[in-house]
Image: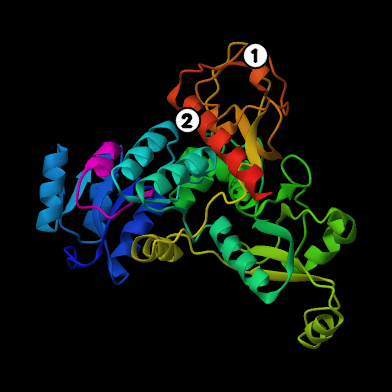
């Protein structure tokens, strides 16, 4: 693969070289006009292994100055601290693709303040701090955007499409293959090894936390709501049963669009939306087009391609100054912590993808503990399995960086949500 690229190419920095970050590195090599110029991970070996596999010239650097020198020479710079990529000159955009939250928030803010576009493939940090990042991006004349390619990005494309067609959005949905709320980094090992996934990340997929985070992102973009905490998630054989498995006439009476998911359905890996149209002429034509009698219509896409589709959001941000997706409706939902097991007083929670809790999407306004803040928080009282963990149940250090940044993001998101409603 070509390493140096051309001077006019978008010079990209990628933070996090897990499954998605490695894919982003590969895709940047084969996408015209893009070049990964710097790669960062707490495990330097992940970076060098990926670069060796793709036959790219690189240099492990020990300072920001050495990083900038590598950029000038057209060699991929490799380092451990994310803040070095945020600080350095020579990068047009930063893609945050790690699973970190607090550390990611810090270098994301620094990148924006240093005039870099920011693309978020880290759904956790996107949900927790998105309104703050977008505020800072506007202030510094750059773009912050969620990434295309994951389920929420593909849903964004589908929703935009049915809006252009003239449909009202009724429901945005995910097709979830498997769910085990009580999965742990120990029980998930065989499945994670089979897919070459990090154990905690695979646990977050399996226990539903990741699903809920992604659906909260789309909810905060389009002002959607869950039917109940965690959504309802009926089990069906195929996505074409969606119009039958939800009581859409009753759910649509309030004219509040919803987020939900179906479980175990084909096609695996897809997403769906339900649109509403009650115009007699259009319904007649839609029946002719084999879409059914209406007034509810199903649209779905049978796949999402993650890193392969992610490049478009980067190009939109850097070349056209456009945000592909952001929290346009403010902070309408978040994902809150529920106990995976009976937890005694004094337990220090281990966060997303761990042994202690799973996350469920809810409308904001209560006193739940956001799952994105749960790591390192100590229980002030015992909590039973499946019990919602509230802020009153825990001891939270108000001076923690992630807590302070979340409060700022929440205030900004609620203000923008009020202005848009």
Q: Look at the picture and state if 279 lies above or below 183.
A: below
Residue found 59% across the figure and 44% down from its top: 416
- Viewer-side residue, 222 vs 69: 222
Q: Is residue 341 left or right of residue 409?
A: right
Asked if marks 1 and 2 touch (Cβ < 8 Å), the reply is no
Q: Which element carries disc 2, helix, strand or loop?
A: helix
| Cα–Cα gap, marks 1 and 2 | 29 Å
Magenta part of the protein: which range?
A: 80-96
Q: Look at the picture and state if 194 lies above or below 55.
A: above
Q: Is residue 260 left or right of residue 88?
A: right
Residue 130: x and y in percent read: 50, 43
State the mark number for residue 87: none
Which tag is nearer the camera, tag 1 or tag 2? 2
Residue found 32% across the figure and 38% down from its top: 110
Q: Label 1 neighbourhood size at 10 Å, few (<14), some (14-19), many (20+)?
A: few
- Viewer-side residue, 332 vs 174: 332
State the mark number for residue 344: 1
The residue singled out by tag 2 in the image is 405
Residue 83: x and y in percent read: 28, 37
Residue 9: x and y in percent read: 24, 66
Q: Is residue 82 highlighted in magenta?
A: yes
Q: Is residue 53 highlighted in magenta?
A: no
Q: Splitting the image into 4 quarters, where does residue 172 fall? A: bottom right
Residue 159: x and y in percent read: 64, 65
Residue found 69% across the figure and 49% down from its top: 421
Residue found 72% across the figure and 21% down from its top: 384
């Amino acid at each position: 693969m070509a390493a140096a690229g051309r001077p006019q190419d978008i010079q990209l920095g990628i933070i996090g070289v897990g499954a998605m970050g490695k894919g982003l590195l590969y895709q940047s090599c084969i996408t015209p006009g893009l070049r990964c110029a710097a790669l960062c991970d707490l495990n330097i070996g992940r970076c060098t292994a990926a670069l060796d596999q793709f036959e790219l010239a690189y240099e492990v650097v020990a300072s920001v100055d050495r990083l900038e020198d590598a950029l000038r020479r057209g060699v991929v710079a490799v380092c451990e601290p994310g803040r070095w990529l945020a600080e350095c000159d020579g990068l047009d955009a930063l893609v945050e693709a790690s699973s970190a939250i607090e550390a990611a928030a810090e270098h994301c803010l620094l990148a924006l303040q240093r005039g870099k576009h920011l693309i978020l493939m880290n759904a956790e940090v996107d949900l927790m701090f998105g309104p703050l990042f977008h505020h800072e991006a506007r202030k510094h004349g750059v773009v912050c955007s969620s990434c295309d390619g994951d389920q929420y990005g593909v849903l964004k494309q589908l929703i935009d499409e049915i809006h252009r067609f003239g449909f009202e959005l009724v429901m945005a949905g995910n097709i979830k293959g498997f769910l085990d709320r009580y999965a742990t980094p120990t029980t998930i090992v065989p499945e994670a090894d089979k897919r070459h996934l990090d154990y905690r990340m695979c646990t977050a997929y399996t226990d539903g936390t990741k699903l809920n985070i992604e659906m909260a992102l789309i909810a905060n973009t389009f002002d959607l709501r869950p039917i109940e905490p965690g959504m309802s998630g009926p089990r069906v054989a195929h996505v074409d049963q969606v119009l039958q498995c939800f009581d859409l006439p009753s759910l649509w009476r309030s004219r509040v669009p919803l987020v939900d998911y179906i479980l175990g359905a084909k096609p695996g890996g897809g997403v769906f939306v339900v649109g509403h149209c009650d115009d007699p002429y259009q319904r007649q034509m839609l029946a002719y087009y084999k879409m059914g009698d209406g007034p509810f219509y199903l649209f779905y896409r049978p796949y999402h391609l993650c890193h392969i589709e992610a490049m478009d959001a980067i190009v939109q941000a850097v070349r056209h100054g456009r945000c592909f997706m952001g929290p346009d409706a403010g902070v309408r939902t978040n994902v809150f912590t529920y106990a995976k097991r009976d937890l005694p007083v004094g337990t220090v929670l281990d966060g997303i993808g761990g042994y202690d809790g799973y996350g469920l999407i809810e409308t904001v306004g209560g006193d739940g503990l956001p799952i994105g803040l749960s790591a390192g928080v100590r229980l002030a009282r015992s909590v039973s399995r499946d019990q919602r963990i509230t802020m009153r149940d825990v001891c939270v250090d108000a001076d923690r960086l992630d807590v302070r940044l979340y409060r700022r993001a929440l205030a900004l998101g609620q203000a923008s949500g009020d202005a848009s409603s």
